[in-house]
Image: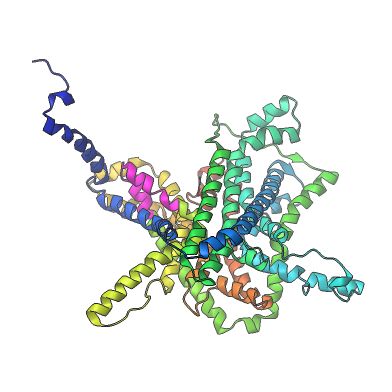
Amino acid sequence: MEARSLSRADLPSGQVAQVRPASLRRRFARLFEKGNFSWSAGALILSLLAAAPLFAIAIMALQSSGDTWPHLIENVLPGAVRRTLILMAGVAAIALVTGTGTAWLVTMYRFPGRGLFQWLLLLPLAMPTYIIAFCYIELFDYSGEVQTVLRNLFGWQSARDYWFPDIRTLTGAIFVMGAVLYPYVYITARASFVAQSICVIEASRTLGRSAAETFWQIALPLARPALAAGTALALMETLNDIGAVEFFGVRTLTVTVYDTWLDRGSLAGAAQISCVMLLFVLAVLGLERALRAGKRFHHTTGKYRDLPESQLTGWKAGFATLACALPILIGFILPTYVLAGDAIVHLASGLTEDFWRAAMHSLTLSLAAAILGVIFAVVLAYGRRQTQSKLVHIASFVPAVSYAVPGTVLAIGILIPLAGLDNTIDDAARSLFGVSTGLILSGSAFAIVVAYTIRFLAASLGSVEAGLSKITRNIDAAGRTLGASVTQMLWRVHLPLLRPTLGAAALLVFVDSMKELPATLLLRPFNFDTLATQVFTLASLYRYEEAGLSALTIVLVSLVPVLFLHGIIAKSRPGTSASRAQTPGTKEELALPIS
């Protein structure tokens, strides 16, 4: 009998429906593959937990907020949206010009101080926006050091005797935030310029292009994907900020969410504004994707030479030195001068019980978030590695979106499900034992740790995935051949190889958690302060000098990964021995968590 394939017409009518379930079973077999079920299930559960705050916000936004939402639409949102857009556009412009220009100078030219500028230009990254904001207010306000010196120097008696630009404006916020956020563009631009092909540059110069024309026509277009990603990160930080804009009196969408929740007592209204902010996030991500346009550039040769560095002399060298020195002066040296002066003057009075308590809270919460972040990242990354299920692979990308969600929005999304869980536990305890448990989750530091873990999970996940990608799958096959299970391979082989990567991931989550302000402000229990909230509270009460010690502590802790990052970028040129020996999973690979 001639063999032929079975068609749907050959099946009885009652058996036709059995064809599709067979294909579904094969798909689910990938998910529940023997030995991988626990990892696949764990990755799916963690992905759902990371996405839960976004679903909670969407559900809460559908509820009625009474007359709050019409009032917000008519009187609050138009101005908040306009100010947010202007702020983001201004910060993006400053970050792009400063970051790209300085990265090109220190990569392609030799001039006085160039070796120092390569790593000094990263230092503003250690300065949180809310800290640099209150530093500049203290420095340039009417009672600040600059105006006081000017009045004493020229004999002015009051503000009517002279004009001085007001720092507490939208323009002041753009200037200060751009000065501290440009390193996001500098990091990605420098990494792109360092890795560029010398053949392309030489071909451009051979065809008669000048150095300036080579930059505009060759290097800048090739660096467009990196510049788009760096600018998107700066915009995300701008949208997330609540401290700096509050100090400058700029009522953005983030401040509106904060006021609507705490001052108006409308959680539904805050959730509705949060949805507007999520539209901003999606717009930034979409713009970043469009600017990159799916372009990827790579070398077509295995031979590499050092990049040609032109020697600048005369006024050109002086201009290059000044161009690189100004961002460092504005973004790090002046704020550090203010913080160090305040910390020294108030050192004895600043080392109070409140300071040590806030420092302990920051340390404990950040350490807990770092540990959980690394554990969750290992489960997600290893679950993806050990399964072919498209569902697991797609779901494991969900936590990356949380990095782009502002802290205020994430705080609302976390509070809603935790409060519901608290109420369920309380009702059960009342009915069974006649005892009220209260808010054991949403009213405790547990909520803050959850927010930190979800918010910065993208950083740790990117680190772990980068490390795993450098471990050949032949090792997995050899271990399985020798009888080791998937879990045994993780404990005996992968984790020992990933120790540097896990350490880098934990460090990134720890430092970011130390600096996080919006989520901490909204989720902290009563009379519970971290170093970040202590700085915000004291600065809000115009007690700037007393906030110096706490702010300086945050900056010093944040310097550790910044200095580590410099070595990674400097050695990132393809083909170098340092590049081949580079530790996987460092922040140079994490600078683009939304890519």
> Going 41% across and 53% down the picture, which residue do you hit?
498
- Examine the rendered structure and indicate whether residue 38 appears above or below residue 545: above
Observer-nearest residue: 18 or 444? 18
Residue 10 quadrant: top left
> Residue 186: horizontal and vertical position, in percent?
64, 49
Residue 510 seen in the figure: no
Number of labels in the image equals 0
> Which quadrant of the figure contains the N terminus?
top left
Across and down, in percent, residue 577 comes to 54, 42
- Residue drawn at 55 percent across, 45 percent down: 578
- Looking at the image, which residue sits at the far left? 1
525 on left or right of 554: left
Q: Is 6 above or below relative to 50?
A: above
Magenta span: 378-400
Main secondary structure along the magenta-highlighted residues: helix
Question: What residue is drawn where x is 88% and y is 76%?
Answer: 157
Residue 101: image quadrant is top right
Report the side of 418 relative to 519 (left or right).
left
Does residue 477 appear to the left or right of 230 in the view shown? left
- Percent coordinates x, y for residue 334 in the rendering: 73, 65
Check the image and name the residue furthest to the top. Answer: 2
